[in-house]
Each structure stands twice: as C-alpha cells, then as structure tokens.
Image: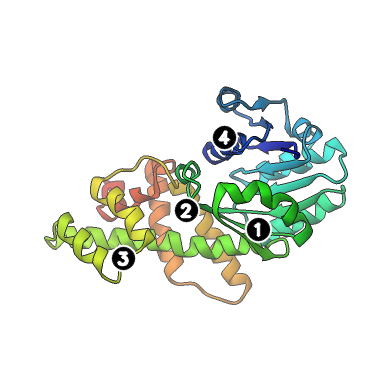
Amino acid sequence: MGEKIGMIGLGKMGLALARQMMTDGHELCGYDIDPDRMKMFEAEGGTPVANSKTVAQRSDITFSILLKPEHIEENTLGPNGIVQAEKEGLIHVEMSTMAPAFQIDLADKLSGHGIEMLDAPISGSHNKVDDRVITFMVGGTEETFNRVRPILEPLAADTSHTGDVGTGATMKVVTNLYVNSVTALLAEVVITGERAGLSHESMEKCLGAGSVRGAMWDSMRPRFFERDFAPRGAVEIFAKDMGIAIDLAKEHGIDLQVVPAARKMFQRAEAAGWAKDDASRVLEVYEGKDRS
C-alpha cells in the first residue's frame, strides 16, 4: 500500500480499526497514553511510537479516535501533537464523536499548519469492526475524501461523503440521537413485558415479526433478555453523545423532549458505577437496581 498510516488512540475501537487496516496490508505506527494498549498494538503487528508528533512524522495520513475534546486537542495541537511535526500536506482523519462546531474549529486550526482534516465518525461498536459492518460518515473536501476513501471503504459496510467538515459529526449526532434513545425505549418495552407476564419467547416471536422488527431490536434483545452487560457501546459514551445531541438541537432552536428523558436513565447508570458497562445496563435502572 502506498500511504503511510498512523493511529492515535488505541482503545477498543482504535485498536480494532488498526488491526483491520493491517489486515488490508497497511503498515501502521501508533500511539496511546496507556502502555498496555501500546503492547497490544505491537502484538498485532503495529509499530508503537513515543507520541503523536512522531506518528505524524512517520505518516502521510493520521487517524485519531479519542474520548474527550481535551484529548484530541492535546494530540493534535499540543506540545507533542501532530502540528509539531511541521508536515505540510499531512491529512488528519478525526474519527472521534464530537460536536460539529468542535470539528470545524479543529479543522480550521489544523489548516493553519498546512494539515487537511476530515471528520469521519463511525456508526457501530468496536465488536462490529472485525465483521466490517460499521459505517463511516465523512465530512471534508471531496479531494481529501477521495484520497482516504480507499483505506476506509474496505473496513465498512458503507462509507459516505456527507459534505464539508462538520457534516460527518452532524450525521453521527443525529444517528446517535436515534440509537441511544431507542436503546432506552427498548429497555422499557422489555421490562414492561416481563413485569406484565410475557415470556421472552413470545416477545421475541411477536415483536420480531411486527413493527418493532429491525436492527436495533435484533442487537439489543439478547442483551436485555440475558442481562448481558459486557461492554460494546458503553453507558458513559451514550450519556456523552446524547448531551452533544441536546446541545446541537438547542443551537438550531429545537427543544428535544425524548432524548433528555432517555439520557437521565443513562446518567443514573453512570452514577451507579456502571459507566464502562454496555448501554444495555440501563435496563437495571428501570428495575431500580441503581438505587438498591
């Protein structure tokens, strides 16, 4: 492969993406603040380096997937960030789920250092990366998108160019608005059915055959029925992303009602110490176990 690639952030999603990129024949260097994640990356065949500056020095295209805005700023604009490589022509692909305004501002700042940015958030949890059923929503110039597209497309069920920088983030926010809220709604469906005497077997058959049928029901049903809270999409991520959705709606004069109500349930799950658990753990909030 012609492009030299670097990955910043080797958490569950970053490491999974790096693994698949290497499967496709790309050579990767990478950085994470956690030495254990760096060792895991090296075991997969990647080359760990000292910081994000070094990632940029060794790459034509850098990818970043991190949890918080301050983490992104540190690794892009900070003393050891990618801008310190002084590598004009570098492409940076920001895959973290952030507010559109944050992504637009970051792209503007990176542009001042000669770095072209795409915002390319992902729909789908880390366990779907190996099956290549995630989707990418990519904002930025068409020229830059076409440069990165050959790397992204093999990793996903769909890779869409959504428009200018920030539109990828906007598409991810509205996607999460649906996914996060429906997760809470399906928890209500299951717990109400259980308490009213319906069996899992009858709910699976009838709901799965009717208007509830769909990807969300198929994904969440076994987790709820089996009380399987092994992390896929974490409670803390849902709470964060719903906050972004609420703020974006307010910016455009919309007073959301459903999303804030659902978010309160995930915030209760966070407060109960379940932040790292799968979002399906919200079911136990409906059962009152967060207050027991």
Compared with residue 66, is residue 186 higher up or lower down, i.e. above or below? below
| Structural crowding at the residue carrying mark 3, measured as other residues with C-alpha within 10 Å and reported as few (<14), some (14–19) or many (≥20) | some
Q: Secondary structure at mark 2?
A: helix
| Residue corresponding to mark 3 | 213
Cα separation between marks 4 and 3 = 33 Å
Circles 3 and 1 in contact, beta carbons < 8 Å: no
Closer to the chain start, of discs 4 and 1, is 4
| Residue corresponding to mark 4 | 19
| Structural crowding at the residue carrying mark 4, measured as other residues with C-alpha within 10 Å and reported as few (<14), some (14–19) or many (≥20) | some
**Image quarter hosting the N terminus:** top right
Q: Secondary structure at mark 4?
A: helix
| Residue corresponding to mark 2 | 238
Q: Secondary structure at mark 3?
A: loop
Residue 252 in sight: yes
Closer to the chain start, of discs 3 and 2, is 3
Q: Position of residue 127 (x, y in %)?
A: 45, 42
